[in-house]
Image (cartoon, rainbow, N blue to C red):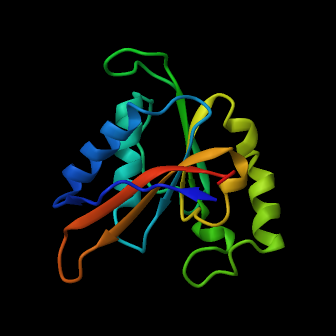
Amino acid sequence: MGESLHAVIELPATEDTEAFGRRLARELDAGDLVVLDGPLGAGKTALARGIAAGLGVQGRVSSPTFIIAREHRAGERPGGGPPVAMVHVDAYRLGIGAGGGAAGSDRTFDELDALDLDTDLAGAVVVVEWGEGVVEHLADRHLLVRLRREPESDVRTAQWGWVSARG
């Protein structure tokens, strides 16, 4: 897999993480897959909220941990451009998060198949928390964002870039 991640950006507050998500959304269109990686508290859901705001989707964005996936209908996109829906997935409970099964297990892939994310990719941006190592097969390329939280601090850092499945 070809990986080219950009330099690290510092995100001192939740508002900065959301603003970063709005900037990333300018690069996204229907059919794009975004994989958010990072430990608990790293800012994955805040980044998803920012992406949603940048896409102009409808509805409040919160962690879909207990429902696994939530679809947000397309709204008016800030700055113009074609409206696009967003599907927000939290793969943590599919056995790939802390305390779950092994990433890439048959059970995990069966649960992902049941979500029909490959179908959603045709008409939406799909944002997957806890998806690294599991959902990349859904698209020829994806935007990988690695988030980290500094110990004893609210400061987060992000490293991001488009990753090709073909190397």
Is residue 109 visible to the viewer in this orientation of the structure? yes
Q: Residue at x 36, y 51 (%)?
A: 47
Looking at the image, residue 33 sits to the left or right of residue 5; the answer is right
Q: Residue at x 57, y 47 (%)?
A: 142
Query: 141 and 91: which one is in front?
Result: 141
Q: Position of residue 8 (x, y in %)?
A: 28, 60
25 up-or-down from 65: above or below: above
Is residue 73 visible to the viewer in this orientation of the structure? no
Looking at the image, residue 55 sits to the left or right of residue 115; the answer is left
34 up-or-down from 85: above or below: below
Query: 21 and 53: which one is in front?
Result: 21
Q: Residue at x 39, y 27 (%)?
A: 56
Q: Position of residue 147 (x, y in %)?
A: 37, 64
Q: Position of residue 164 (x, y in %)?
A: 61, 49
Q: Quadrant of residue 120?
A: top right
156 up-or-down from 5: above or below: below
95 up-or-down from 1: above or below: below
Looking at the image, residue 16 sits to the left or right of residue 23; the answer is left
Q: Position of residue 144 (x, y in %)?
A: 49, 55
Quadrant assignment for the C terminus: bottom right
Query: 120 and 1: which one is in front?
Result: 1
Count the marks: how many? 0
